[in-house]
Amino acid sequence: MEIDRVREILSELGKRLRAARIERNDTMDVFAQRLGVSVGTVRAMERGAPTVQVGAWLNALWILNQLETVTRVLEPQESLLDRIRAQEKRRRQRASRRP
């Protein structure tokens, strides 16, 4: 089962990858060599194929100086409950005892 939105995103990423490769004046062959993958893999990436390994995508982003754009993906998020607990902890701090 393939989710329609995922297909759209992969297709758009593939178009952007192709545009970035062409802007660098890289042929598919040259770009594939830099990535360490086959020309067929680059072609599949540019088509937005869902079967391309995430490692190939991350290597492509690194080559294009775009790797930092995905470093926050799945980063742990502080929940609302955690924020409330932290506020409560700050409020509950007592003054130190004097001798």
Image (tube, rainbow, N blue to C red):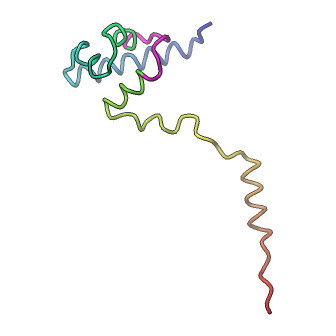
Determine whether, in the image, residue 29 is placed left or right of residue 90: left
Query: Within the image, what quadrant is residue 17 found in?
Result: top left
> Is 1 contained in the magenta span?
no
Looking at this view, name the residue that lies furthest to the front.
36
Q: Quadrant of the N terminus?
A: top right
Q: Residue at x 32, y 35 (%)?
A: 65
Horizontal arrangement in the rendering, residue 57 relative to residue 93 (left or right)? left
Front residue of 5 and 17: 17
The answer to whether residue 94 is above or below residue 43 is below
Query: Looking at the figure, which quarter contains the C terminus?
Result: bottom right
Q: Is residue 14 left or right of residue 34?
A: right
Q: Which residue is at the front of the view, 42 or 37?
A: 37
Q: Looking at the image, how many numbered discs can be counted on the residues?
A: 0
Name the residue: 49% across, 19% down.
9
Specify start and end residues of the magenta stretch as a single range.
Answer: 46-55
Estimate the x, y position of residue 31 in percent, counting from the top left: 26, 19
Look at 44% across and 14% down and name the residue there.
Answer: 11
- Residue closest to the eye, 21 or 98: 98
Whether 68 is drawn above or below 96: the answer is above
Residue 7 vs 99, above or below: the answer is above
Q: Where residue 54 sits in the image (x, y, percent)?
A: 47, 21
Q: Residue at x 48, y 38 (%)?
A: 71
Main secondary structure found in the magenta portion? loop
Q: Position of residue 37 (x, y in %)?
A: 34, 15
| The residue positioned farthest toward the left in the image shown | 25
Q: Quick one: which residue is furthest to the bottom in this view?
A: 99
Q: Quadrant of residue 74?
A: top right
Name the quadrant containing residue 33. top left
